[in-house]
């Protein structure tokens, strides 16, 4: 496992919302982090997956932000390199979304993409 400084980032708003959700779920242990993955499926072929986790795997890549540790597996990193996780609480929809420069197209809901 290696801690990297570039790769996946998160806006301040996304970091604070993730921490808030952890607290609401009763997770206040500093060993927990946000796991970001790419899985097959969705209307564009690939989907983002977010989970709270506290178990690092051998090939995990770790990204430190101001408030939150983000972890992904090496396969997902190939799709997520230079991606920013953000959070919107506006009238057009609430939730996490990804600003992924690797995506050639995304679906209308923003939860799936293609490369």
Image (cartoon, rainbow, N blue to C red):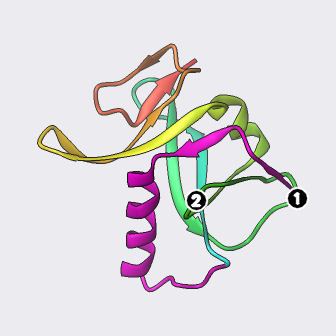
Q: Mark 1–mark 2 contact, CB under 8 Å? A: no
The residue stretch that appears in magenta: 1-30
Q: Quadrant of the C terminus?
A: top right
Which percent across, then down, holds residue 89? 22, 50
The correct choice, above or below, for 81 with respect to 89 in the image is above
Q: Residue furthest top?
A: 104
Q: Secondary structure at mark 1?
A: loop
Residue 1 position, x and y percent, is 87, 57
Mark 1 closeness class: few <14, some 14–19, many ≥20 residues within 10 Å: few
Q: Is residue 87 above or below residue 100?
A: below
Name the residue at 67% across, 74% down.
Answer: 54
Mark 2, Cα crowd under 10 Å, few <14 / some 14-19 / many 20+, is few
| Residue 60 located left or right of residue 50 | right
64 with respect to 12 (left or right): right
Residue topped by disc 2: 66
Residue 72 on image: x %, y %: 69, 50
Find the distance from the CA under tag 1 to the CA under tag 2: 24 Å
Counting every numbered tag in the picture gives 2
Q: Is residue 16 magenta?
A: yes
| Closer-to-camera residue (63/102) | 63
Q: Which one is in front, 113 or 7?
A: 7
Which label lies toward us, 1 or 2? 2
Q: Residue at x 63, y 31 (%)?
A: 82
**Residue drawn at point x = 52 percent, y = 84 percent:** 28
Q: Earlier in the sequence, mark 1 or mark 2?
A: 1
Residue 58's disc is 1
């Amino acid at each position: 496992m290696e801690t990297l400084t570039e790769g996946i980032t998160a806006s301040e708003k996304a970091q604070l919302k993730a921490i808030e959700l952890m607290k609401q779920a009763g997770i206040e242990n500093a060993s927990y982090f946000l796991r970001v993955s790419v899985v097959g499926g969705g209307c564009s072929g690939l989907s983002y997956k977010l989970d709270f986790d506290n178990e690092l795997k051998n090939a995990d890549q770790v990204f430190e932000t101001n408030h939150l540790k983000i972890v992904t597996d090496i396969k997902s990193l190939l799709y997520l390199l230079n991606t920013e996780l953000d959070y919107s609480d506006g009238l057009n929809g609430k939730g996490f979304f990804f600003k992924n420069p690797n995506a050639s197209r995304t679906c209308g809901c923003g939860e799936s993409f293609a490369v």
